[in-house]
Image: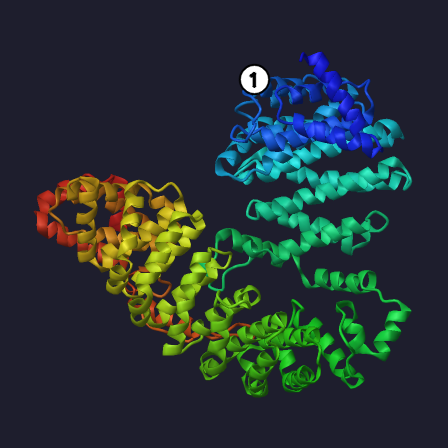
């Protein structure tokens, strides 16, 4: 059958398939279903929906059948797949013109083009993007809009692909078209703003539609098109321009009639601008840091000051509040409990947030929340007056509270506002601590609703968190009651989560005394972190946090505490978002009792780590490797022995020149520990790896030293830089020709590290190593500072034995150079020193002056 005859038959079937008469409809649908796998069927459908003279319903149905066919038969491996020749013809036919007059059909065609693009672009369809861009530039209004609509759907679809190779292809596409997309958006935006000023409603609506589409394209390109967007000036320029455009569009809303067709699209565009910021913040929190200040200023200004009056609408208000909340609660912007473990970006973000939320700003936010957003009707106030408990839980469907608890509820409510205040002063609160804690405990016992108990526990947690160790005299009754509450809440996992959170703060407040809770505490941790138990779905995250603080505050290991670690193997296999906490727990066990822990669990831990390292992010690799580093720091000999299976991969990473600086820095930290504190193990590892690389031992050692010197800039922490210097210096004195060849590099590293660690002693005026620690001092704390945990104390005591903190780099360099000189003689040593740059020698002499 020729194409013309086929078209006629298919057209008739489609016409009957749009009929309301089932006698015609059912046979037509069956016939169309049989044709789905026939060669040429989709070419006929293309001709039909591209024919604007035909009935709209028929064309619509042709598009839907074509779209379904892509899902079923476009892939090469699909049963009854379309031939490559027909697909080539169809791709060409889909983009010959962008002049579809019916909006709904135009949208469906754009979607089906995007479906093909997902499978074929750019390899089998390289001409798609260039043709779309060219059509978008055209002067014909309809063609420009349809091409832009298709451009958006194609971009959206390609951005959604998640395989690494597909991401790279999309990033290549984004870098190639970003400038054009920005200029397109800017052009249509300017046109719209000018037309609004000129009260040109018809053209303004058309420009606004194009602004919305081009902004949708930019949203996908900006959020998903760049691995490190902060390094792209155009991306950051666009994001900064978003704030100005938002202000302009909000001002425009004054001039656009609420009933105008423009109004709805204007509000959609404003919301889309906020989505650009929120999406970018979610996907690239570190790249968003330069935008934090401006985002907070913008959102707070419009939502919590008079600047937004008459301009903002409900959805915009919600988006602004989401922006503030996401910035405030973002995990990437929170420093670690141990500041030295924090990333510089986290510290920077935290500093910006803290500086922004001043007391006056917070006061105004609180005032506006209560006076503008939390308004109660007279009926609601009357209900609260009559039945405060029933009113409080009505939204969550609770049975009623007792009227007699009203005073305590109001006390708790007021207290919650107080303890959550940024300016909470512990010393001002302490005189009321006993009475308030007693009231809260009574309330916790008397209320019956789970939601209420959770709220009261939240307030109790806040109080304990704020007053810390000063809660100790008052928690006896709570400690006795919590086991009963835990038992009663067996069917209420969310209440158990609240109990876990309370226990976290309670353990932190009790410190070493928390060991008296182990009879209750350890079974709770065991249950919450056992993935074979159904409740773990709800309890795991809080259970891990409780496990960690219990270890950090434990004065000594117990058999029961050690036994819980049996849960960890399954947790590591899950590779969930809780991995970081799992690694912190492993480290806490090593600090608590390295010998007992490693002898019992290192073998299984090694297996888990080896499996994890096969498929984990760079950050995840660093977390795994830090565990090995901690083990080597705490117990150099046992740590190296127990984690021996992991060390060859570390060695390979150094030799092969690991690309990622943070990973390389950690590799060098581990190898530095082995070389400095377990030289015999390093020697045997070097022999093993020389055999693997089929190299002489000296040749391989030379390569390691050379790479170490070359990648020293990857190491940013002063402690690790000093460790590297000490480790490489430990190779001296040496008559090994390879070590002597690398002498110049070793000295360069040492001088760099001396610059890092040497400071002037204010008492004597001489230079001293600022990393040296001679004794352990209990820190003097203000009332608002948390006391050190037992783990903090363990780390301090460990540091006293750590070469980084117990060996003077200045003295060590001097002694090693004197030993090398004694080995080689003055003449040989002089020749060796001549291999070092004269300026480096001069600086070295300054550092060693007086020794």
User: Quick one: 711 or 128, which is closer to the camera?
Assistant: 128
User: Quick one: 750 or 826, which is closer to the camera?
Assistant: 750
Question: Image point 78% across, 67% down: which residue?
Answer: 395
Label 1 Cα neighbours within 10 Å, binned few <14 / some 14-19 / many ≥20: few
Question: Image point 64% across, 54% down: which residue?
Answer: 326
Question: Image point 77% across, 33% down: which residue?
Answer: 26
Q: Quadrant of the C terminus?
A: bottom left
Q: How is the image coloured?
A: rainbow
Task: Point out residue 691 in the picture as x, y percentages from the top left corner.
Answer: 17, 44
| Residue under label 1 | 85
Q: To which quarter of the image does residue 272 belong?
A: top right
The relative height of residue 56 versus residue 772 in the rendered view (above or below) is above
Left or right relative to 490: residue 572 = left
Residue 442 makes an appearance in the image: yes
The relative height of residue 526 versus residue 261 in the rendered view (above or below) is below
Q: To which quarter of the image does residue 156 belong?
A: top right
Q: Secondary structure at mark 1?
A: helix
Task: Point out residue 591 in the picture as x, y percentages from the top left corner.
Answer: 36, 69
Task: Point out residue 575 in the picture as x, y percentages from the top left corner.
Answer: 46, 55
User: Quick one: 70 or 482, which is closer to the camera?
Assistant: 70
Task: Point out residue 16 in the picture as x, y percentages from the top left corner.
Answer: 80, 27
Left or right relative to 593: residue 350 = right
Q: To which quarter of the image does residue 79 belong?
A: top right
Residue 210 makes an appearance in the image: no
């Amino acid at each position: 059958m020729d194409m013309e005859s086929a078209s006629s038959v298919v057209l008739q079937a489609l016409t009957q398939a749009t009929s309301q008469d089932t006698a015609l409809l059912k046979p037509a649908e069956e016939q169309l279903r049989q044709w789905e796998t026939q060669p040429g069927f989709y070419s006929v459908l293309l001709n039909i929906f591209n024919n604007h003279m035909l009935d709209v319903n028929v064309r619509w149905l042709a598009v839907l059948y074509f779209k379904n066919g892509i899902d079923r038969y476009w892939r090469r491996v699909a049963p009854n797949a379309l031939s490559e020749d027909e697909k080539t013809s169809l791709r060409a036919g889909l983009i010959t013109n962008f002049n579809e007059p019916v909006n709904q059909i135009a949208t469906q065609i754009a979607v089906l083009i995007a479906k093909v693009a997902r499978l074929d672009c750019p390899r089998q369809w390289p001409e798609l993007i260039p043709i779309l861009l060219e059509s978008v530039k055209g002067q014909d209004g309809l063609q420009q809009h349809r091409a832009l609509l298709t451009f958006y759907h194609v971009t959206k679809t390609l951005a959604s692909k998640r395989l690494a190779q597909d991401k790279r292809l999309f990033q290549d596409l984004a870098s190639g078209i970003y400038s054009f997309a920005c200029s397109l958006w800017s052009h249509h935006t300017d046109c719209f703003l000018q037309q609004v000023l000129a009260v040109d409603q018809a053209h303004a609506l058309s420009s606004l539609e194009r602004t919305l589409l081009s902004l949708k394209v930019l949203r996908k390109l900006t959020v998903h098109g760049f691995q490190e967007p902060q390094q792209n000036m155009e991306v950051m320029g666009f994001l900064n321009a978003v704030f100005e455009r938002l202000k302009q569009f909000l001002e425009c809303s004054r001039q656009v009639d609420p009933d105008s067709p423009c109004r709805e699209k204007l509000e959609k565009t404003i919301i889309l601008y906020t989505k650009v910021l929120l999406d970018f913040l979610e996907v690239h929190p570190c790249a968003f840091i330069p935008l934090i200040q401006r985002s907070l200023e913008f959102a707070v200004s419009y939502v919590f000051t008079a600047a937004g009056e008459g301009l903002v609408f409900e959805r915009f208000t919600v988006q602004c509040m989401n922006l503030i909340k996401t910035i405030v609660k973002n995990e990437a912007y929170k420093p670690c409990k141990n500041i030295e473990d924090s990333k510089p970006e986290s510290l920077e973000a935290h500093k910006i947030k803290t500086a922004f939320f001043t007391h006056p700003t917070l006061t105004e936010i609180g005032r506006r929340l209560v006076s503008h957003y939390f308004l109660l009707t007279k009926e609601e106030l009357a209900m609260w007056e009559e039945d405060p408990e029933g009113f409080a839980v009505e939204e969550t469907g609770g049975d009623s509270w007792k009227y007699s608890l009203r005073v305590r509820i109001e006390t708790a409510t007021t207290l919650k506002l107080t303890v959550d205040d940024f300016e909470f002063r512990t010393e001002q609160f302490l005189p009321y601590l006993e009475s308030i804690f007693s009231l809260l405990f009574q309330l916790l016992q008397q209320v019956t609703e789970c939601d209420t108990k959770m709220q009261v526990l939240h307030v109790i947690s806040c109080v304990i968190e704020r007053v810390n160790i000063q809660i100790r005299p008052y928690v006896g009754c709570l400690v006795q009651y919590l086991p009963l509450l835990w038992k009663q809440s067996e069917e209420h996992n969310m209440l158990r989560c609240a109990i876990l959170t309370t226990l976290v703060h309670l353990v932190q407040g009790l410190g070493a005394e928390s060991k008296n809770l182990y009879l209750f505490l350890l079974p709770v941790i065991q249950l919450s972190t056992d993935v074979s138990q159904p409740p773990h779905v709800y309890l795991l995250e809080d259970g891990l946090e409780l496990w960690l603080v219990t270890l950090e505050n434990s004065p000594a290991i117990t058999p029961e505490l050690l036994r819980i670690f049996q849960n960890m193997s399954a947790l590591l296999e899950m590779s969930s978002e809780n991995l970081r906490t799992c690694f912190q727990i492993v480290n806490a066990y090593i600090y608590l009792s390295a010998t007992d822990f490693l002898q019992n669990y290192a073998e299984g831990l090694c297996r888990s780590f080896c499996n994890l390292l096969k498929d984990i992010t760079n950050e995840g690799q660093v977390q795994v490797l830090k565990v090995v580093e901690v083990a080597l720091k705490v117990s150099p000999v046992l740590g190296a022995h127990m984690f021996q299976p992991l060390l060859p991969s570390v060695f390979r990473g150094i030799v092969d020149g690991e690309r990622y600086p943070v990973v390389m820095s950690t590799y060098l930290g581990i190898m530095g520990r082995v070389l400095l504190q377990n030289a015999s193990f390093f020697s045997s590892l070097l022999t093993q790896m020389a055999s693997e690389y089929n190299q002489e031992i000296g040749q391989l050692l030379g390569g390691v030293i050379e790479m170490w010197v070359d990648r020293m800039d990857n190491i940013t922490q002063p402690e690790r830089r000093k460790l590297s210097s000490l480790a490489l210096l430990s190779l001296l004195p040496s008559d090994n020709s390879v070590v002597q060849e690398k002498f110049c590099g070793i000295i360069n590293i040492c001088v760099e590290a001396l610059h890092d660690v040497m400071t002037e002693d204010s008492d004597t005026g001489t230079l001293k190593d600022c990393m040296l620690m001679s004794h352990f001092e209990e820190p003097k704390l203000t009332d608002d500072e948390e006391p050190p945990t037992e783990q903090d104390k363990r780390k301090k005591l460990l540091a006293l034995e750590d070469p980084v903190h117990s060996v003077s780099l200045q003295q060590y360099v001097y002694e090693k150079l004197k030993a090398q000189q004694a080995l080689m003689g003055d003449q040989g040593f002089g020749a060796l020193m001549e291999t070092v740059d004269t300026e480096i020698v001069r600086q070295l002499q300054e550092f060693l002056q007086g020794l």
